[in-house]
Amino acid sequence: MQESALILSEYEDINSLLLKPIAATQRIKYTCINVSTNYIVLGSTSGSIYLFIRESCVFQQLMPLSEGPVTHILISPDEKTVALSSKRGSVCVVSIKPVFKLLSISNEHIGEIITCLCWNSKSSEIYVGDNNGKISTIILSIFTVNGMFQAPSCALMHLDSSIVQMDYYLHYLLVSTLTRCYICDTTHEQFKQIGNKIRDGEFGGCFFKTSTELDKNSEKASDDDKTHNKSIGLNSIMGLNDDINHDQSLKIYCARPGCRLWEVNIHGTVLKTHQFREALSATPTSTFKSSMIKTFNNTEKSDENFSSMQTFNFSRLNVISKKYLLSYTTNNLYIIDPINTNIILWTDEFSNIFIINVIDDKIYLMTVLGTFHCLLLSSIDILILKLFECKLYNDCLRACTIFSSHLKKIITNNEVLLNIDKLNKIDWNNTESSEIINTLQPIISVIQLNINTPQRLHSGIMLINSGPGKLRTEDSRSLNSTAENSISSINDMKNGKNHESDNESSDSEIIYKNLKKNINDMTMNQRGSHENGVKQITHSLSQVELSDYKTEQNLLTNDYQKYQESQSKEIETAMSTIQSNLEPLYILIGTLKSSQTIEEIEKIIDRVTKTINDINSKYENITQLKHFIYEIIRSFERHYFFTLLENISINLVSTNINNCILNEMMKAFVDLNSSNYLECTCGYPRAIEQCHEPKFFKVGKFLIETLIKIDKNKCILLCKNVPYMWREYLMIYIDNENVLEDDIIPLCLLTTDNIILSLLIYLLDDNQWNIFIEYIKKLERGHCLNCNRRFEILNTNNTDLINWSGVTHEIMKKRGLDNAMTFLRRLEKSLPHIKLKQDLYQSFIFTKLLGRYGLEHTVEFGEHKLDSKYGSICSTEAQKLLVEALEKDLERPVKKAIFGSGVFHWGMLYKLKVSYCSSCTLSLQTPVLLGNNGISIFPCGHAYHVNCVLQKKITKCFLHS
């Protein structure tokens, strides 16, 4: 097969789809875009981010944030997290899977302009660069444990100028600044400058993996990648410098002045310089645009003059189609072949280019004016197939006409050549679709056959069907494409093409069997009500001879295509209508303010509830839409509930009790906080491991205080779904000295929360205590406290499900030592097998000793009191003295390793606010800087190496100046 020329095309109109969520408002504008395999995410001037499905551009979710206008946004490689920077210099890390959640906000670059973001390949770390050359890193694992350990991000390095571009591969970070390019080994925390010549301007750089190794042995490619990753990890631990020597196909390309590129190996050595000045003298290439694409008038045309080569830079470099580089300026796009030092094509048809993202062979472009384009880099053959596949028959006919000279080179069939000659005579604007399809079908069949021709690799392996991999036919069209391919193949075999006559029957039978298998493998969703018709056609197909396959296959294809078109139109219309109905609601709930009256809030709630109910009832019978409706409405409801509780005034609602608003507040509070709620099959709650303080706790407290007076059943229901609120429920009982109902006891017990159980025990009379003990025994046996059904408790040892030492500590703190002792005697009598921790008895002893001397203070022992907020530093001199003293006392050698970083060692114990020096940003444990002087800590908690304090003459913490 002759290799087809590459071309840029635009046949998908993504602009109107992406602008839909903000079409109703003039205040909000998009500021940035990022594209991943499955998603498109857009930042906005309001600080919110908008999430879309990439292939269909269907709006999924609005994620509101309050950090100000978004300047950069980046989806993680695993597509579970989004990092974004704001105009004020903060960086937010947001989870999008499984639920939307703000994980962290970093203020490391506050007041600076963030220029780029970069994820590592494991989606565990984000690198942030700013206009001052500062690069910081955020470790994602720090922020994913229920909001704990909210430490600031760590400054990684300070370079000489603004960061232009960053790229990551394996454990290497590539950083390009205005003057230099650096390769950083993040495992060994070392970096090296690439080359010696500096530059001045925005120049990009990226990693590039050539496909030469893949061509040599296609079968071993995936295995080599796995082995490669394993060896990298092993060698990194061993500290070898040549840990990537076995992968010679990995290169780095760095932009240089004068339209040049440096080719660099992974060690930072410049291998050669590629010159593209002459290649750029070629005329720009036209982009093939579908007639469906709207043309936008760019009034702000740039004054860039391409002939002035002195001002032209490859400002950004991206890999496209895994074999080329993409670079762009304000008005130009360039596709570069770095292997052969050639410019494949360049175009100047797009003005005011602001941001470009690349996914495989697609280019997503955003202009300064806020318009979007989706371009495809492909061969002419693939473009023609894509247009036909998308049913853009007029555009497909026009493409065949424009590129007729290319088609004549790859087609040898005289009848098809005659069709191509007729293309110029057809008025494709006034031709019916059926006639166009008949004209195009022979051409499409030949192109498909050429693409499907087996190719022989260097190793001698025949690569079957290597071409259409880039075509990516959608599932909804797979049967149609299979049918067309099968028809073409059968016709070719009947005409004697590429097959011996002796094998014609057997080859036809193989294709026929594959066709039947594809029909039988259709999913139930694809078949729908059409299933009976497919079975009948399949049965008929099995009765005919091979000579009649074409007739029967056309019947199947046409019948299925009609059904598919009707279904897809209905679904597309429904999806568009649902989004249109929700868009005004997003705007409406954005008007929620704490200053609104009860009547205004009630009107908003009524309208939202009515619209959601209408959508659910209207489309409940369309099974294909169930998942979509659930996802998009669930996303809207989460945003609505969050906004409602964030803006509603508790004082207003408490003075004017409104059942509608009260019910909606309860619904929102439970929805946002019931993620760890577990049930038995009978509907009764199961034991949970830990209670966490819920979001909008003040709202929950207000609901408990209000509902316990007017509807106790609703109050109990709220506590069942959000177990933490039993604390407030029981406190009200204690304050009012009420008698506790028996049915509350098991519900409180299932929380296994120390504080809740300590409050509950105080309210139990003798009879209720016996009931309480029976429930505990049933829980230890692993039975449901309602239906007595046996199930697995979350804890592997059911007797350890309740921390009785912790419960006793809580009783001692609230009720004193005597009440705690009384409880222990009672507990030991009822449950003699219970084991208590040693530190509980220590607490009893020291609390009693203090009480004898008139000091009423509860002493607590335990590991939980010595947490990670404390650290220790041992200077070299102190370490030496300690080792000598210990060796003298113990009369044996002592290893210095015992004086490492840890809580229990002699040195200086301090409250850890940051783990690095606030001056040099290196670890406080750096031996060279620690020396014999140690560290200096200011009252604010920030620590400095004493050497840094002496060198820079620091008299006060400059982080607060």
Image: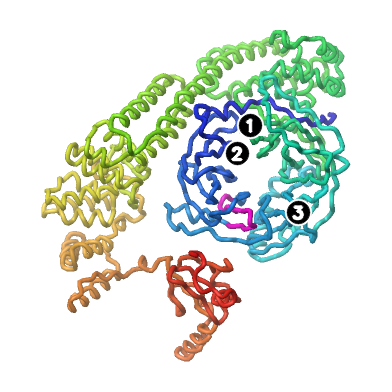
Tell us which disc is closer to us: 2 or 3.
3
Q: Does residue 303 sit above or below 496 in this rendering? A: below
The three-letter code of the residue at mark 3 reads Asp
Mark earlier in primary sequence (2, 3): 2
Determine the secondary structure under disc 2: strand
Q: Residues within 10 Å of mark 3 (few under 14, many from 20)?
A: few
Rendering coords of residue 499 (x, y %): 82, 22
Q: Residue at x 53, y 54 (%)?
A: 110
Determine the secondary structure under disc 1: strand
Residue denoted by label 2: 33
Q: Which residues are magenta?
A: 121-136
Residue denoted by label 1: 372
Q: Within the image, what quadrant is residue 71 found in?
A: top right
Alpha carbon separation for disc pair 1 and 2: 9 Å
Q: Within the image, what quadrant is residue 844 found in?
A: bottom left
The three-letter code of the residue at mark 1 reads Phe
Rendering coords of residue 283 (x, y %): 85, 32
Q: Is residue 318 found left or right of 897 in the rendered image?
A: right
- In the rendered image, residue 212 lying in the magenta stretch gets the answer no
Q: Is residue 513 visible?
A: no
- In the rendered image, residue 124 lying in the magenta stretch gets the answer yes
